[in-house]
Image (cartoon, helix red, strand yellow):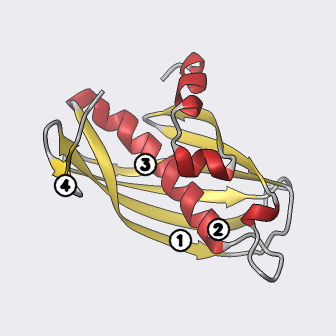
Amino acid sequence: MAEDALPFLNEHLGGYNRAMGLRLTRADADGVEAELTVGEQHLQPYGLVHGGVHASIIETVCSTGAALHARQYGQSVVGVENSTSFLRAARDGMLRVAARPISRGRRSQVWEATVRDAGGRALAVGRVRLISLDAGEAIAGKTVAVE
């Protein structure tokens, strides 16, 4: 996807990703990158970035890349597994996350991502497995629309 599509993608990130303050900086079927400035809302009671923040941004970039790949088949994707490991704690600063595909099939995909701090140190790594849904399939009681 062309760089000029980033404003569109960022505008349509959705409620949770917008509330977290995530911003995509690169997005195509071969990789997705994003960044987030840590705020008080991202911290757990000990003042560290909450593990859910890491898992969420990993899932977002992996899902975005998988969705861009699935579009060529008229499909959308949903995550069915997210395995995130926490390597190093952070309290503030900029988080950068980069995802790349491991396996891209017509029915399932596996992507992995790494969250790094501003110094380039790995904070978390994760792997997300996604399934591809054809237009008209239902998930959670609602038909999937593929745009």
Q: CA distance from mark 3 to mark 1?
A: 14 Å
Q: Secondary structure at mark 1?
A: strand
Residue 67, relative to residue 3: is it above or below?
below
- Check disc 1 and report the residue beneath it: 84
Q: Which residue is mark 4?
A: 141
Left or right, residue 29 beside residue 51: left
In whole angstroms, how far apart are the C-alphas of marks 3 and 2?
17 Å
How many marks on residues?
4
Q: Is residue 46 above or below residue 128?
A: below
User: Which of the labelled discs sits on residue 63, or is there none?
Assistant: 3
Badge 1 or badge 4: first in the primary sequence: 1
Percent position of residue 45, x then y: 78, 81
Furthest residue in direction left, as rendered? 136
Q: Which residue is mark 2?
A: 124
- The percent coordinates of residue 25 (x first, y second) are 66, 34
Residue 76 in the image: x percent, y percent?
28, 40
- Confirm whether residue 99 shows in the render: no
Q: Earlier in the sequence, mark 4 or mark 3?
A: 3
Q: CA distance from mark 1 to mark 4?
A: 28 Å
Please tell me which residue is depicted at 74% across the width and 76% down the height of the picture.
44
Which dot, 3 or 2, sits closer to the camera?
3
Give the side of residue 48 with respect to residue 51, left or right.
right
